[in-house]
């Protein structure tokens, strides 16, 4: 069988599928992507490069659509080389909405076309109008509607689609839902597992400078690093030793942004530090916006929170991205793990933390409530209430013995519903059906 996976970010949701299929010598596995980095044994990467980005003069409703089309053109041209070699995929499995998949049904009309869908945009009732202090305008609503154009094209052209959670499926137009199956891509519970008496000890990752007299503080001042970047640089140079800490609160997200409740979390950290002088907070992720709007004038949400809040930076650690083994250490050593999200795509990080038996303290929002039952496998709070976040975190910190059952129930939830070992065979069967 010949398989073609399509995602601009290699390997994304297709890592386990592509890895497994490539182990069979009877298969040929291709992966069309825009990302040079990374490889999977046995998988042939095909790199495409859009000729340009959407032009500034393009109507702003259409810029994301134009970018999708440009990705689609570049992908089509790259795969024409494959077609000229007489290679036609039996199965194409593409992440919907990005663009490179848009015209593949035209190039390979006899291939089975499967799509992975994550989100269908709505102006009202989910993520966009969730914060009443950040209301959307009629112009926003129109732009959001048009943003679905590439997704609708994929819904129409795919033979079948997959979506990771029931709540995410419910966001899609009812007339297309019969095409969509619900199956999460799975959590590797053999890797994400608890460790008794775990401690957090991250080694330095930056190579020391050989020039005599190198002063990290002077170098930071010279390059005008932000406070968060300074903390990250220091951790890279010195490592992080919290092996003697008795209270470690953790937070993980791709970006430090309102969509994942970063401002509310930082407000809670400020209060928590006042209440608990021995509490340490570890933030994993980058000081950027992955979803939603950027702040004006180049300011990041991380910078803004550090400017506005009274924070003890000696007990607050911004690690940036971590290798998987170090990320696992953070989760295993966590006393309380805080997760927030708007009504939007559910993060892998929540499920990975649950698999690791973290004590979950999470926002009471629709995607979270599909997996967390308050008081059973986690504790829930009002997204917009930093004081309630603190109360629930302190509930965990003050009663570690009582939380033992809740931690084990969190892992049981993942083993029952999201275990890669169970879901991968189902996913392979679905692709090949």
Image: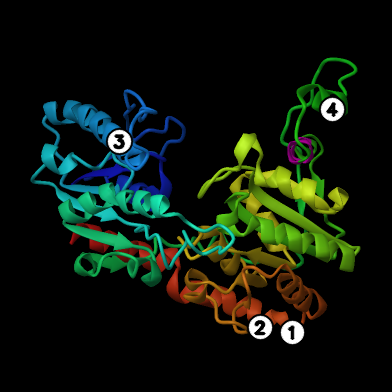
The residue tagged 4 is: 216
Query: For residue 195, what is the image quadrant?
Result: bottom right
Mark number displayed over residue 367: none
- Residue 341 is situated, as x and y percent measured from the top left of the image, at 55, 63
Measure how far apart labels 1 and 2 are at the Cα level.
Answer: 7 Å
- Residue 37 is situated, as x and y percent measured from the top left of the image, at 46, 32
**Which residue is more in the foreground, 391 or 348?**
391
The residue tagged 1 is: 402
Measure how far apart labels 3 and 1 are at the Cα level.
Answer: 54 Å
Q: Marks 2 and 1: in contact by CB < 8 Å?
A: yes
Q: Is residue 195 visible?
A: no
Measure how far apart labels 3 and 4 are at the Cα level.
Answer: 44 Å
Give the class, few, some or many, for how many residues have Cα within 10 Å of label 4's Cα (few <14, many ≥20).
Answer: some
**Which residue is more in the foreground, 15 or 338?**
338
In front: mark 2 or mark 3?
A: 3
Per the image, label 3 sits on a secondary structure element best described as helix
N-term-proximal mark, 1 vs 4: 4
Per the image, label 2 sits on a secondary structure element best described as helix
């Amino acid at each position: 069988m010949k398989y073609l996976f399509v995602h601009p970010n290699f390997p994304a949701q297709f890592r386990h599928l592509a890895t497994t299929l490539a182990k069979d010598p009877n298969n040929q596995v291709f992966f069309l992507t825009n990302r040079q980095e990374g490889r999977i044994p046995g998988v042939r990467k095909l790199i495409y490069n859009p000729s340009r980005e959407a032009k500034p003069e393009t109507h702003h409703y259409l810029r994301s659509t134009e970018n999708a089309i440009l990705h689609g053109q570049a992908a089509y041209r790259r795969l024409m080389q494959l077609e000229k070699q007489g290679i036609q995929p039996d199965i194409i499995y593409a992440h919907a909405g990005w663009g490179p998949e848009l015209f593949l049904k035209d190039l390979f009309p006899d291939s089975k076309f499967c799509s992975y869908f994550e989100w269908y945009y709505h102006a009202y009732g989910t993520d966009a109008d969730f914060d009443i202090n950040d209301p959307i305008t009629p112009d926003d609503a129109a732009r959001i509607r048009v943003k679905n154009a590439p997704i609708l094209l994929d819904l129409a052209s795919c033979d079948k689609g997959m979506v990771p959670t029931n709540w995410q499926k419910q966001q899609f137009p009812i007339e297309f839902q019969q095409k969509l199956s619900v199956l999460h891509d799975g959590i590797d519970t053999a890797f994400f597992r608890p460790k008794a008496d775990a401690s957090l000890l991250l080694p330095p990752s930056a190579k020391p400078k050989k020039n005599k007299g190198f002063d990290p503080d002077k170098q930071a001042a010279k390059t005008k690093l932000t406070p968060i970047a300074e903390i990250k640089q220091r951790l890279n140079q010195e490592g992080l030793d919290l092996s003697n800490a008795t209270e470690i609160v953790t937070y993980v997200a791709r970006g430090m942004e309102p969509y994942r409740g970063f401002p509310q979390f930082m407000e809670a950290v400020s209060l928590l530090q006042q209440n608990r002088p021995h509490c340490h907070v570890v933030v994993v992720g980058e000081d950027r916006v992955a979803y939603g709007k950027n702040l004006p004038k180049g300011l990041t949400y991380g910078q803004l929170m550090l400017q506005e809040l009274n924070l003890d930076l000696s007990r607050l650690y911004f690690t940036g991205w971590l290798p998987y083994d170090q990320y696992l250490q953070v989760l295993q050593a966590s006393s309380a793990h805080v997760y927030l999200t708007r009504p939007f795509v559910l993060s892998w990080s929540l499920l990975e933390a649950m698999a690791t038996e973290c004590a979950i303290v999470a926002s009471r929002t629709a995607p979270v409530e599909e997996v967390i039952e308050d008081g059973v496998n986690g504790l829930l709070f009002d997204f917009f209430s930093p004081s309630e976040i603190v109360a629930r975190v302190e509930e965990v910190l003050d009663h570690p013995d009582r939380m033992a059952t809740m931690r084990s129930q969190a892992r049981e939830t993942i083993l029952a519903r999201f275990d890669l070992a169970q879901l991968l065979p189902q996913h392979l069967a679905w692709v090949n059906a």
